[in-house]
Image (cartoon, rainbow, N blue to C red):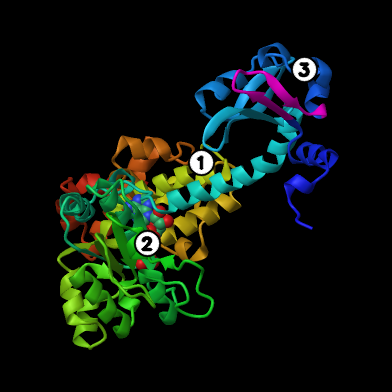
Amino acid sequence: MKLGISTLPKKWLEEIINLAAECVVVVDCKGTVVYINSAYCEFLETTMEEALGKPVQEVIENTRMHMVAKNGQAEVAVVQPIKGSEMVANRYPLYIDNELVGAVGTVMFRNPQEWLNYSRKIQPLLKELKYYKTKFEKELKSKYRLEDLVGESPEFSEAKRLARRVSSSQSSILLSGESGTGKELFAHAIHQMSPRGHFPFVRVNCASIPENLLESELFGYEEGAFTGAKRGGKKGKFELAQHGTVLLDEIGDMSIHMQSKLLRVLQEKEVERVGGQAPVPVDVRIIAATHRNLEKMVQDGEFRQDLYYRLNVMKIEIPPLRERKEDIILVALKLLIKLEEKFNNQGIELSVEAAELLRNHAWPGNVRELENVLERAVNVLDGKIIRGAHLPLYLQDGNVRPSLAYTQLKSPEVMSHITKTSIQPLREIIASAEKEAIIEALRLTNGNKKLAAEMLKIGKTSLYDKCTSYNIK
Ligand SMILES: Nc1ncnc2c1ncn2[C@@H]1O[C@H](COP(=O)(O)OP(=O)(O)OP(=O)(O)O)[C@@H](O)[C@H]1O
Ligand SMILES: [Mg+2]
């Protein structure tokens, strides 16, 4: 027996239509209802007998079925108000043997509740998708601008000036500086100022990716390149950064083998995916960063000289914090603002004593160390003022002379952030500065009061009086 739709009993066909779409209506090319299923009739509060043979406009309010049957243009997922609810309808032209003979209409959701139930299932998925999309896009954007790099010392200002100048060029840049000096921040800022700023910024940490994975991370791979390779392959960081910037962070930790591969990319301006056939052209600007001494590594044969020259077209050296002491408090205050946000604890101030301890420390871990010290302090804070006791012991061991703070913290902006509560009366500050100066002068002159008075440019009697009143022997 030949099977097919023609052999199905009429009752079956009806039920199949009912199951396939809850509400179905069919009109001929004049817009007359030639078929309507029971579910639609129920929804419209009519009967088949009543609806069949009538112009569709008389059966369904706000319908456009007769237009679709005439113009042959499908209308998919359009909102149609019926009986005070907004339902979602599909209208398809019905072509038989290439001839427009009518239209088929279905209702996807008969009321907002149905739509709501459906969208309740879909919404979390859409939200999740949006989250990952923005997260991914954010990852590929530079996060810092030059204004975010706090520091006014001549050395630091010079580094910022250089960064601004080189940002517009296409050449590679080498950022060198001790750990925690802000190399990554500079890379972000340079990208952001450059004409590539609207394209991706992609950072690769050459030290943290295992040697055998670095190649596929950087250059990507084709499907089936190795066991576990993703379907469809994967783009490498260079391809992801197309027209943008790649930061090769910790470049000093890259193996000699990878250095050769990288050099090839820089020379040919194309990458070869692992397991790939044809090279892919890439247009990226390279910024390399390291805390290691690349010159010495070249001398010792640990870093390829040719690669070094390619990367070192322009070099920016970022000075360590201890060489820009005047910036320490400025940076600390900027970091405190960040911490205030993080801990939702506004109005935190630095006491003069704490500020002085921060200034006197050598900061081998630079800004990152300062950040950690302040975060720890904010954590152990009982009020709003960071005092010496809130700092780690290795900072408190420093020799503090609070009065010094006033000569060194000259900016009024800085002063307004340093707490007033720990400031002594001016009379006492002057007295203690005077006392210190006299002790220092006497120390330098081996206790010779006459010479000391000359050094201090005051009279001998005046010095004697001051020694008595300050109890200096
Ligand atoms: N001038 C600055 N102003 C404000 N914050 C800074 C500054 N420099 C660095 N930071 C902060 O200090 C931290 C360390 O900076 P970054 O990661 O750029 O250092 P790095 O030089 O890359 O260090 P490493 O060599 O260890 O990777 C970051 O959290 C950054 O926000
Ligand atoms: Mg870094």
Q: Residues within 10 Å of mark 2 (few under 14, many from 20)?
A: many
Q: Residues within 10 Å of mark 1 (few under 14, many from 20)?
A: many
Sequence-wise, the earlier of marks 1 and 3 is 3
Residue that carries the numbered disc 1 in the rendered image: 348
Residue that carries the numbered disc 3 in the rendered image: 51
| Amino acid type, callout 1 | Ile
Looking at the image, residue 48 sits to the left or right of residue 377; the answer is right
Residue at (21, 57) in percent of width and height: 449
Residue 446, position as x, y percentages in the image: 23, 66
Residue 329, position as x, y percentages in the image: 36, 49
Of residues 294 and 463, which is closer to you in this image?
A: 294
Residue at (56, 24) in percent of width and height: 68
Q: Secondary structure at mark 2?
A: strand
Quarter occupied by the N terminus:
bottom right
Instruction: Look at discs 1 and 3 and give the one toward the viewer.
Output: 3
Magenta-highlighted residues: 24-38
| Amino acid type, callout 2 | Arg
* Prevalent SS, magenta region: strand
Sequence-wise, the earlier of marks 2 and 1 is 2
